[in-house]
Image (cartoon, grey):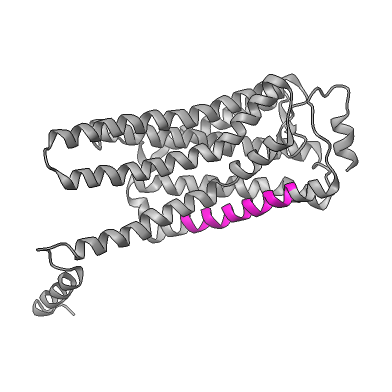
Amino acid sequence: MATIQEWSLSPSNLIRHEPQSLSDIYALHGAALVVIYSSILGAGWMFYDSIKTKKYETLSGRFPMYMAALNFCWSVSHSVDHLWMILEKGDSPPDSACKVLGGLLSVFMMAELFLIDIMALYMLGTVYYGNRFSLGTYDWMLFVLIIGVPICYVIVTGSVGALGHDYYWCLLDISIPAGRIVMGITAAAACVCVAVPAVCFFLIYRKLKEHVNNVKGAVNNQGFTSSVMKKLLAFQGIVTVSFCGVAITGTSISAFKYEPTGLVWLTILTLNSGGWLNAVAYYMQEHVFCRERSKSLDASPGRPSRTLVLRNSGNSKTRSGNP
């Protein structure tokens, strides 16, 4: 644990930390790895299931795939420094390795923040203007925004020496002013990432509510609005939970030069939970709720059951000579 003590007691380091014992280190990084590995499994399954069910055929279906891919890349990269610090009993990875890893993590984090905002704006535009949006062949405009811009951001961040090791992991060197400034920018980006979907979803709710009010007695429309809002609220909840920790901790570091252990725990448990939280929400929406909707349609009066429809379809194929 000598590296951590030397770094935290350096005269050039103005960040206040609470002292940690070896058991504290094992608990903190062990909990981080449990959450991270859960997100790796969740994001991997979500990406596989999206391909299996051909979600890639539509832009709205590809958004969850891109989110799962970013969650997976973030989780795999972030597992390296936490695992290292457990094996080395608190010592950080070498400076050069930590700078490279911090750059990768910054790219994946900023890419996810951009993707979430673009998804929210896309849904808002679809509700207000219809399905008239294209992001180019193979979504190249989307990749320019969510990958190209974060790479430029990391190049600038690295050029001012802000990348490096924190007291707890590899991301930003908050012992220098440049690192604390970039940490403040990261916290602001996280706040924007939470605020933009909230505003977009509120406007979507108003538009859907207005449509329901204009169509008197439209029970099905009310049910549709309720279903859509449940999905949007679930998405908003995951975004808020995932980035609340880094927003609060980043503000504490940049504004007060203080990184309390409680906020570190909050950041570790929330920021690394995006993969498994998104997987749970995806499973509920694409599998559980879909089955419930199918059952409700089969039970609707005056509507032939799904089984009967499939049976009649099979009979018609047989009569037409199809096997």
Q: Is residue 168 visible?
A: yes
From what the image shows, is residue 190 above or below residue 279? above
Quadrant in the picture for residue 318: bottom left
Q: Which residues are magenta?
A: 28-46
Question: Which residue corresponds to the image point at 52% horizontal and 53% vertical from the top-left?
Answer: 43
Q: Position of residue 228 (x, y in %)?
A: 31, 44
Image-based side of 183 in relation to 289, left or right: right
Q: Position of residue 150 (x, y in %)?
A: 56, 31
Image-based side of 218 in relation to 188, left or right: left
From what the image shows, is residue 300 above or below residue 317? above
Q: Position of residue 259 (x, y in %)?
A: 73, 30
Of 174 and 30, nearer the camera is 30
Of 71 and 228, nearer the camera is 228
- Residue 30 is one of the magenta-drawn residues: yes
- Quadrant (top left, top right, bottom left, bottom right) of the C terminus: bottom left
Image-based side of 275 in relation to 130, left or right: right
From what the image shows, is residue 109 above or below residue 52? above
Question: Which residue corresponds to the image point at 73% horizontal and 45% vertical from the top-left?
Answer: 81
Question: Which residue corresponds to the image point at 31% horizontal and 58% vertical from the top-left?
Answer: 290
Image-based side of 30 in relation to 54, left or right: right
- Quadrant (top left, top right, bottom left, bottom right) of the N terminus: top right
Q: Is residue 141 visible?
A: no
Question: Which residue corresponds to the image point at 18% horizontal and 37% vertical from the top-left?
Answer: 212
Q: Position of residue 37 (x, y in %)?
A: 62, 55
Of 160 and 194, nearer the camera is 194
- Residue 167 is one of the magenta-drawn residues: no
Of 176 and 303, nearer the camera is 303
Q: Which secondary structure dominates the residues rendered in magenta?
A: helix
Q: How many marks?
A: 0
